[in-house]
Image: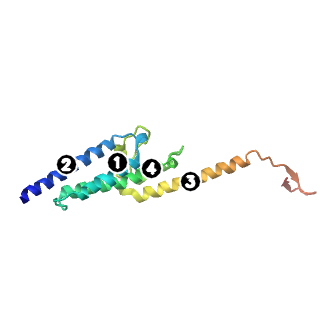
Amino acid sequence: MMIKVDVNGIIKLWTHTKKCNQILEGYKQLEWAKLETAEMDEEINKRLRKELNDLRNIDKKSTTYTGIQKYLKNCADFVPTLGELKDPSIQTADMRHWKRVQEITKSNFEINDQTTLAVVWDLNLFNFKDDIEETTERAKQEAKMEKQLAKVDEKWKDTVFEKIPHKDTPIITLR
């Protein structure tokens, strides 16, 4: 009877592992422009990780269990980082923020609408989570400053300053 329980637990674990791999490999085929990180986060955290934790009659110290658990944790860490990288503030004309990500990951890659998630996954961003987060926060702050500067520029662009001499001196003042 115990052997049957153990075998059923192993079958459940391998079935779940196969399902996780199929879903996650499917995500890796998605193009950058079509990524929906909220849906991915929901799928990984609320469904796949929960289902793994809910499995009964399995050896949770087995390499299969710990392996899929680590894989799902890496995916769970990866998705919010991915969401940060999809923020519009990262996209600048000079690509400086993406260049910074390349420096952090010590990789040379190109991101465009057709880039698949597999390219980004292979960068192992979960190993650089804090540095990536710092870069994306900087990008957001710079975008806010650029927006404010554009407002200031717009407000003052049509203003004409007339230069006049100050009394009977060679000093020029604005009117």
Q: What label does residue 121 carry, if any?
A: 1
* Residue in front for this viewpoint, 68 or 164: 68
Q: Which residue is mark 4?
A: 85
Element at label 3: helix
Residue at figure coordinates x 58%, y 53% from the top left: 144
Q: What label does residue 93 carry, if any?
A: none
State the separation of the CA atoms marked 2 and 3: 47 Å
**Mark with earlier residue (4, 1):** 4
Callout in the foreground (1, 2): 2
* Residue in front for this viewpoint, 27 or 128: 27
Q: Which residue is mark 3?
A: 142
Q: Which residue is mark 2?
A: 15
State the separation of the CA atoms marked 4 and 2: 33 Å
x and y, in percent, of residue 62 in the image: 17, 59
Element at label 4: helix
Element at label 1: helix
